[in-house]
Image: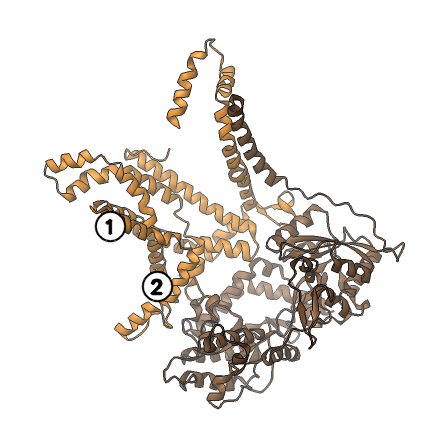
Chain colours: A orange, B brown
Amino acid sequence: MKDASSSLEAMSEPALIVKPNKRSALFQSLKRDKWLYLLVAPGLLYFLLFKYLPMWGVLIAFQDYQPFLGFWHSEWVGLDNFKFFFQSPDFLRLFKNTLILSFLNLVLVFPLPIIVALMLNELKNALVKRGIQTLIYVPHFISMVVVTSMTYVFFTTSGGYINEIVKNVTGHTIPFLTDPQWFRPLIIIQTVWQTTGWSTIIILAALTGVNAELYEAAMMDGAGRWRQLWHITLPAIRSTIVILLILKLGHFLDNGFEHIYLMSNSLNRSVADVFDTYVYYIGLTSGQFSFATAVGLFKSIISIILVLGANKLAKKFGEEGLY
Amino acid sequence: MKLMKRALPVVVSSLLVAGITAGCSNNEAASTKSKKGGESDSNKPLDITIMMPSFDQELADENSTVVKKLEEETNTDIHLRWTPNDTYPDKFSITLASGDLPDIMVSASSYVKAAQSGEFWDVGKYIDDYPNLKKLNPIIRQNASINGTLYGIPRIRALGRNGIMIRKDWLDKLGLQEPKTTDDLYKILVAFKNDDPDGNGKDDTYGMTVSQFSGPWDNIQTWFGVPNEWGVEKGKLKPYFEFPEYQEALDYFKKLFDEGLINKDFAAMPPSKWYDDIQNNKAGVIVDVVDSAHRIEKELDKLEFGENSTAEQQEQKTFMTALGGVADPDGKKHYLPTSGFSNLLLIPKPAVKTEAELKRVLKFIDQTNNQENQRLLFHGIEGKQYTLDGNGYVVATTDKTVLKDLQDLNQFQTFIPEDLTIKPQQTPLREKEAEIQKENEKYVVGNPAAGLISETYSRMGAQLDQIIDDARIKYISGQIDKAGLKAAIEQWKSQGGDQVTKEMNQLYSKTKK
């Protein structure tokens, strides 16, 4: 695309004989590339209509929004919703639960696709490699509802497969599904199972871009597999990893509403309540749209700070960053 | 050709743009409405627009033979505004905001605010003048009211739907009687666990199956005499969990849990799996809506006699029996009712302007409850949409084009005072279910605060309820003890519960006057 447009520019450049002022230059370039602009128009319109326009909706976070009164007639309440949220007894618990889960997610789940991709990359037999790849992609296509349902079948104390094994070995069952201590491990296991395979795709794509000659040269110099990995492979995909990390940080506080909601129950709610589920309970089941929007907005602000921070940090370390 | 090439991108992109904008400009053509005939000329048919949810694609329209017949019967000119059920709540709010209102609209949950700001007629003042509507069940009437005011005609559903379903063959095998009290039930649950009711020599059965769904607990605690949501003590409302019976019921639950009479993992069991154990010969008791009995029976028939078994084979053995509930240890019966209605038919003031017009619309709704019209709206016209077989049972036609004339018209049926349609062919079990539903109405405990809406509760209710519901589950499964239960109640009070109680009592004393 980039190439095409620059060659197009180059082609039409000689046509501009008169040196135009700035305004007509803009007009000229609009006229020149009108087909391109027309082509991009639907896309732009899409973003304007469905991404930017609805963004004004966040303003209801500063209102006492009533659907019946609508946006224009609802009362403005300033920062009341935020104050109420920060002072509520739930806030600290929610914040803690969200952070712990997000942190575990980052530390345990994020590196796994990289490791798996590197391992796959070392496989010499293409057929085996393809086979494994396909197999580990499969869980990605299974809906979270099904995953949690499967988890129930496997882990329930009344006849679950895993618990039957546990019972045979230790003589008693473990309440995986109801014990608050087991909540986070289960969530992480499910996330790993569902996302690892799919996330290897980008890493594997980056790996194919590594120049094979580098390996040959390294081998000539007597570098073993580990050395090659350390000095060639990892540096080659470093910028990909950094970008992925920054993108991941943008979703740092998203714990996956559906996932948490489906796995939480009366007995593990003390650790399972996170911002995502809270927004649902408050916004949808209690109909406090403004309050829920305020919570969501707070989450988004944290996320944007994290993304900007990470991006800056990446640049400091000489990486490209997102922009 | 060259022109074509140049024109193509323009056409394509403008089509795309058009597609996007079309989605936004889906304006409802404002329907102009003629003046009602009600006051001036009583013989002129009443022009009436009805908005209601639809469940099918092919719906009855204004040329429908059934609608025409109803128009004749009620001297009306009916216009139908169908809205798919999935988007009904949204469309309901939009319609309210648009100002282009029908004469009758089925409510959605968001109607409360609009009703309180005077958007709908207070029909409670008028319904006593109509032969059918005045017989509206008082509990349902209260449930359907908001702070004492009835803003629409409720669409009636069975009030005593809850009950208990038990494996009849297991009872027989162990020589047990149907339970009369909670103690009897306990003994049955113990026997179902320990005495090998399925006779396979294995310890693979247990008593009652429960899930995350709180329904069974709510039901059983009501059997113990716990009030339905709110109880009245010395003329004041008190939340149900502050009554001593609540502790009694919870200890009973705990006993069931500790002795393994219910499934240990119930707190994690998705409600979708709730029926699995009773349909697979593992559990013998379930507490839910009583009409589930015949559905369980069907599954067990399949399990026993195979997928393709005939009705004769299936009749050889009866697996299930059903009861409305059991009595408390003192032998008194109190059961938990279902709300008894599913949304209201609202009459918006901007569309129905005068009292005279309102009375005419109410007369129409009243007329739809005559036996003849109930059957017309539910079954259609005899000889067209259905025929009667030798035993007087309805045989619906399979001709889709004829059925279209009837499709979803039952959505504006209110069934007051009762459902007078022709019953389908009954198995003994189904007959029993119907009997129980009727019998239950004698014992159901009304919620004295039903229809009272506290401002704090509408804001925080979901969270407050969860504190109490979670504490109940935690207590049953031993995660907290009595002190923990007390702490949860204190938490409920301090986080808004006290405020709710105060507001409810204010509303209560107002409606009592």
Observer-nearest residue: A131 or B203? A131
Check the image and report above or below for B136 versus A14.
Answer: below
Percent across and percent down for residue A14 are 42, 12
Which numbered marker is on residue A182? Answer: 2
Check the image and report above or below for A68 versus B370.
Answer: above
In the image, is B345 to the left or to the right of B467? right
Which subunit holds the residue at mark 1?
A
Which subunit holds the residue at mark 2?
A
Residue lying farthest right? B41
Percent across and percent down for residue A148 are 41, 60
Mark 2 crowdedness (10 Å alpha carbons): few <14, some 14-19, many ≥20: some
Answer with the quarter of the image where residue B378 lies.
Answer: bottom right
Percent across and percent down for residue B276 are 45, 71
Does residue B23 show up? yes
- In primary-sequence order, the first of circles 1 and 2 is 1
Q: Cα distance, mark 1 to mark 2?
A: 35 Å
Label 1 and label 2 in one chain? yes
Observer-nearest residue: B318 or A187? B318
SS of the residue under disc 2: helix
Check the image and report above or below for B176 versus A64.
Answer: below
Percent across and percent down for residue A313 are 32, 37
Check the image and report above or below for B505 versus A320.
Answer: below
Q: Label 1: which residue? A: A128
